[in-house]
Amino acid sequence: MNIKKFTYLVSVSLCLLTSCDMEAPSKSSLDESLIFSTPSLAEAAVMGIHVSFGETNSYRGRFLPYYGINSDVEWINGMSTTTNDDAKYSLTGYAASPTNTLMNDATNAWAKFYEGIERANLAIRGLRTYGNVSTNSELAQLLGEALTLRAVVYLDLVKAWGDVPARFEPVTSETTYVPRSDRDIIYKQLLADLLEAENLVPWPNASKVTSSVERVNKAFVKSLRARIALYAGGYSQRKDGIRLSTDPELSREKMYAIAKQECEDVINQNVCKLGSFEDNFRRLCLEKTDAGQESIWEIPFAAGRGRVLYTFGVKHQAADQYTQQAQGGVNGPLPYLYYDYDVQDVRRDITCVPYEWSKANPSKQQLRSLKNWCFGKLRYEWMTRIVTSTNDDGINWQYMRLADVYLMAAEAINELEGPANAAKYMKPILDRALPADKVTAYMTKATANKSAFFDAIVEQRGLEFAGECLRKADLIRWNLLKTKLDEAKAKMLRLATHTGEYADLPIKLYYKTGSNGESLVIYGLNHGDTDSAGAILGYSSNTDWIKADGSSLPQELIDALYQNNPDEHQYWPIWKTFIDSSNGTLTND
Amino acid sequence: MKNMCATLLVLLAVFTSLSVSAQNVTVKGTVKDKTGEAIIGASVVQKGKAGNGSITDIEGNFSINSIPGDATLIISYVGMKSQEVPLKGKKMVDVILEEDAQALEEVVVIGYGTVKRKDITGSVSSVNSDQIAAVPVASATEAITGKMAGVQITTTEGSPDAEMKIRVRGGGSITQSNEPLFIVDGFPVSSISDIATSDIESIDVLKDASSTAIYGSRGANGVILVTTKSGKQGKFSVNYNSYYSWKTLAKKMDVLSPKDYVKWQYELAALKSSTDLTSYTDFYGNYSDIDMYNNVPSNDWQDLTFGRTGHTFNQSLSINGGSDKIRYAFNYSHVNEKAIMEQSSFKRDNFSLKLNSNPTKKLAVDFSVRYSNTDINGGGANDTKSTYDSDKRLKYSVIYTPIPLRNLTTDSGNSDDELGNLYDPLVSISDNAREQNRKQLNMAGSVTWEVIDNLKVRAELGLDDYHFTDQRFWGLTTYLIKNEPAVENQGKPAAQFVNTAQKTFRSTNTVNYDFKKLLGENHHLNLMAGHEYIIIKQITQTDMIHGFPTWFTAENAWSLSTQGVPYSINKYLNPDDKLLSLFGRANYDYQSKYLVSATFRADASSKFSSKNRWGYFPSAAVAWRISSEPFMEKTKNWLDDLKLRFSYGTAGNNNIPPGQLTQPFEPKTTAWVNGFGNYWAASKTMANPDLKWETTVTRNVGVDFTLLGGRLNGSVEGYINTTKDLLILYPTQGTGYDNQYRNMGKTENKGIEATLNWTAINTKNVELSFSGNIGFNKNKIKSLGIMNDFGADSRWASSEIGYDYWVSVGGSVGQMIGYRSDGRYEVSDFEDYNGKTWTLKKGVTDSSPAVGTLRPGVMKLKDIQGNDNIVNRDEKEIIGDANPLHTGGFSINGRLYGFDLSANFNWSYGNDIYNANKIEFTQTGKYQYRNMIDIMADGKRWTNLNADGTICNDPAQLAAMNANTTMWSPLTDRMIFTDWAVEDGSFLRLNTLTLGYTIPSSLLQKVKITSLRFYVTGYNLFCLTSYSGYDPEVSTIRNTNLTPGVDYSAYPKSRQFVVGVNLNF
């Protein structure tokens, strides 16, 4: 009997030995054939791309706060002129080194952008293989969305780093390491991808999905394609200096034609509308994402993610009646910008804010200083939700709005056909900003000739989009980066020394707290205001705003706008950690 | 398993009822030892008929009623040499047993078998039950600390369940765990911390590949074999051990007095803004009233947090015995500890039963079951593996304000919580509450059948069922609840429940043939072959719940989970981990003089694809017993044994998570994207279908010696281990994935070890012995594949410091990288003060990129590159190494009549500690209102403060004010890691000191007690070290393997006193 038992045990063991299946498949996972043929699953896979946008050091904490800064309208506030800090000031001052301590990190935007691209590549391959996009509109939307999100990331990669590795297929062991490829190759792929995507996604409000600007719609695909065409047809710094593309497929004419076509398609479709300038930003702060207004597409940061208002909002010194998060004011407009707006331009007081909220609860507005303005397009006080997170505010990043489409159309048509045909797309932007008589005068001057109109485009894009980080890339494609930064420095110097076009401004500001107990009433910010008039207003306080000795806006600070020649440093270097781990395929040469 | 049990029960029933028949005479006698002391419980049996026998009584007497007059008696007793006495008609037999010749005959467990220590050809260190029993410790790992050469054990913190880091000869992996393989009674387990020490018979550590190769795939980092106690034939005993201990905090940091604290806060506020002093006045009042802080009482937060006296109550009961047919061992043990930190406690119950039966002469059936249940309460060492740096909060017991401050809220002094704001230490403990429970049930059975003489076939089946529940709570002060939940649930408590269930099944079959005498007297050959199959299935369920009502405590959240909002419910099924192995071993010796052993193992792991699945691990070893050579005849009178051995072999490693071959889509949860709570994505780790086995080649040479009749013995060994095809979690940032497991790179560990045991005196009433060991190990990275180096970041200061460890070819894991301190800027370093800023003199190094705005007193760094007189943020070099030059331990054991004394020391020499505490406790970074330790006391630190409360910018006056200060000003822009914070971590610790008294057995005989011992033990009585932190044995940041030796906000160590009793029936 014992023998028998033993034999039984041995045979059990031998059975185990012979029938052992050594494969161990994953269990808590799904195969891509199922995911990409099922709309709800495929949608969640495409949304994974946005998670890469939201990673700590991705769009959320690095790219959005630092890429567009410094330009001739935007800078990072409080640059130190004495500490030689190789972090944010060199990053924004055209002097970033590959070891930049803010960026040289394995979780940086560079890595997370490629993570998003890989997720997009997997989704595109999966949807093309398993998703019946020709008959299933839900899956078609998702393919179009994945193509578009991939284009968004690539465009930003090229904007920030120039030539970058092109990965349009999921990584394999052969493609783990790839060198930089020419940006022209990437631009052409993006233009083709978006042309495909146009036919996959509906116009805003034409489907349930596109009723929200947090999802990709046809208007966004087209306007993004226009933006890419303008960059592709514009100047940029290449190995052999600043020049246009030599690729005939990316000739200026072809690119302007694409921009014209796409922008006119969007405008003529009439599915988005220009509301008031202020309303657009109030809606952004109120987190109203219904499509059909000015906003075309936004990065959909959830309420607990993103540092948009945190970086670009009006500063709150402490948790108060409007926010539990004491942030804002990290970046701001250049000090002269406010004074360059027409005093009646409605965009001025929304874009440039000279105050912050005091360190008290309830808090009230208090003056900042000439060198330390806040952007005002985003304000905690415009939100209905109270921000509670200590690090994130949850405001979406408005990636594209209709005003941009109008001005892109105007720019392209001016280049192709001249100012007469282009004027109709600039005027609506001015109409909502200025009184009618001033619009007429401006348009007369602008339509004098092609170059005058171009100058007007350059000026209006600055006034319209300050604080939205479009400026730096615009200046680069116009080959005006250093010219305009130098112009800005000269303006700041004249402002600081109370000379030139700023000589008429009062020295002091006169101010008091308004009847609501929190708003500041300020006199002295307008051209035409005078100290003598200010002094007799009887306001409770006054302060030297533009000190005669120039100390309100020191020369060192003005000089810190750029540390290196920006035309020779249009791009960030690839950070050392990525060079090191690239198996020798990437360099900064 | 069911069949196994049935078999066992049937066999029990059949064979215990067998009775003995046919008798001739009655034999009586006594058994004594050399000193004339009666031996109680010695076994006296008839040779060839083990069922017929007796056990000696309390006076050493025995009596056997029916035995043939010509029979032979076998008298045996543990620790004594067995004797055979032919009766030859005698009816009275008095026997004197001699003690076993020390260690030489000791049996060592070597994996799928045992071997006598003298016949060992590889490198094996052992600790036996006597050594373990001598000192009361809670875990097996503690029991071997400092006792084995080449086995470095670091207790990473002072919490009751602190991770004990075990390294056998350094460890070859870079990113992967270097933990050795743990085998308990043949069964591989993930940890040995839940085994009761009273249940341990021996612990053997296999160190070289010739020993570990039998474990093939998983032996590369050494193998720790734990053998639990089995019943002993003919000896029934009951053991009761109990102890009670008191624990107190071993060391405290001195902090600033309230007055000094307030004074510094004033200077800090004034330095930050000379015009806006509200950051001071809002909290402390006017500077002119600072005198009111002169004699105010202060809170000693360290005392409030860690100051309570901990208690441990530990008791164990074991029952042991058996006949020649069946032996049994039962053990129950219970530990209950209240630790020194508030809300920290530990409880464990162990139960084990082991049955060994021999139903026939040719058959052995063994069965064992072990159960342990462990509760750990308190979040003491929370988050050493988390990205939420701010939750490492034990630091608040030092830096929290010593006096109550009106207006102080958690976000005072800093608006971002990445490093953690200022939290009441006690609140932060309850806001980070945690309860863990581990349950482990292990069952194993085996049948061994001697098919023909000396051919044994053995089949083993085992099942291990492991459940781990971990519940955590995040209260209102935690970083997580402010940032992770969806916005509507932010600022409300959160809880997490993690349930892990793991089942391991093991089937092992071996055949063993001993060519006993078949090859003649002189040749001994033993062959073993076998196969093994192990499958591990694991399911982890992680439930995260946010948004509890703000007044909820941990207890509320854990018991009322419906009151929160489910954030994620994730039941994750791991891919199965399967291992199929075939192995064999041959041991041959000629006259015990020339010994050869060869091992071969082939392993197939499901972690690799079919083309790379099998790994083959051969090894061989030879030994030469020089002392048996004729030319050594002259040394016979003093040299008992001298053996030279050499081994060469390979061992493997597949220590990566399963499921790396394909890139499946996994469901994940997010709160970052509007409208989507979950998404599908590929893992952030790139799949690698080409993965294969990592292989370690070891070469070992050793000398074993025994002198003076066994009173002096020891061994000296040297080794070179090289690991190639390193399984490494390789950074692949920029490809779309964060990392990928690869076979890349090569490391080397070289070292020398020595062990010495000396019994100076050993008589009936007096014994004095010493033993010691030392191990030198040098780790070197030979290759990192396509990379030369990469940085690692301990992240204790979030992202402020950046890389602080550097992994490079030619270096070793554990190299710290940072700035070189150059003291501070003196007034003489500056040209002038222009009313706003201080201008440096030409030629003086500008440290401002690293430290912030310069003024006299600011920390100064060295310009390492020496090219531009500027210290840039990346201007760092290697400034420390966490690897010790050598580690070891020694013990002294003495006995005088009934008293026994044992002292165990362990040490580490030459390792550096990254004292992150010291940085944070002396620098402000971006924070206000924090207290500091007294190296920054007034009079020591640089001061900028005039008596009138203004900041001094007068060069001459500043210089005069600081003529006697030595430290820089604590004000810095961020946390700065310089070589000043790298400290020598060498230490020598008196780990335990025990004094015991055994009541003379003559007094106990009447109450039927075999032995009774009382003892007192002191733990951690002193620690000689120059290290300034809490304790030099520390390693807090264990998220990766790459950042050893950081001392940051660790649970401090305690000093402990124990009284206990050992009772033996």
Image (spheres, rainbow, N blue to C red):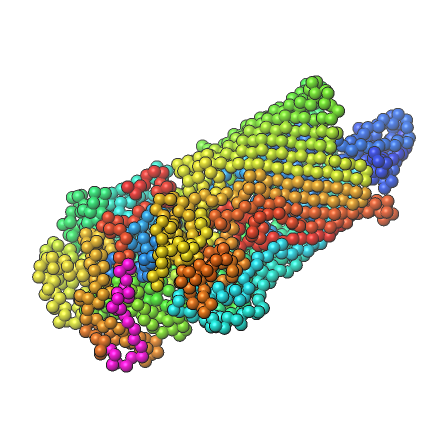
In the rendered image, the quadrant that contains the N terminus of chain A is top right
Q: What secondary structure prevails in the magenta region?
A: loop
The verdict on residue A547 being magenta is yes
The verdict on residue B482 being magenta is no
Where does residue B166 sit, x and y in percent of width and height?
A: 58, 42
Residue B727 vs A279, above or below: the answer is: above
Residue B254 appears left or right of B725:
right
Residue A389 vs B575, above or below: the answer is: below
Residue A489 vs B1015, above or below: the answer is: below
Where does residue B12 sit, x and y in percent of width and height?
A: 74, 39
Q: Nearer the viewer, residue B935 or B991?
A: B935
**Number of numbered discs:** 0
| Figure quadrant of residue A345 | bottom left
Where does residue B275 sit, x and y in percent of width and height?
A: 38, 69
Q: Residue at x 44, y 35 (%)?
A: B783
Q: Is residue B907 visible?
A: yes
Where does residue A150 sit, x and y in percent of width and height?
A: 30, 50
Residue A53 appears left or right of B311:
left
| Figure quadrant of residue B704 | top right
Q: Nearer the viewer, residue B846 or B41?
A: B846
Q: Residue at x 79, y 39 (%)?
A: B766
Q: Nearer the viewer, residue A163 or B257?
A: B257
Q: Residue at x 40, y 74 (%)?
A: A362
Question: What is the magenta range?
Answer: A534-557
Q: Is residue A278 visible?
A: no
| Figure quadrant of residue B901 | top right
In the rendered image, the quadrant that contains the C terminus of chain A is top left
Q: Residue at x 45, y 64 (%)?
A: B945
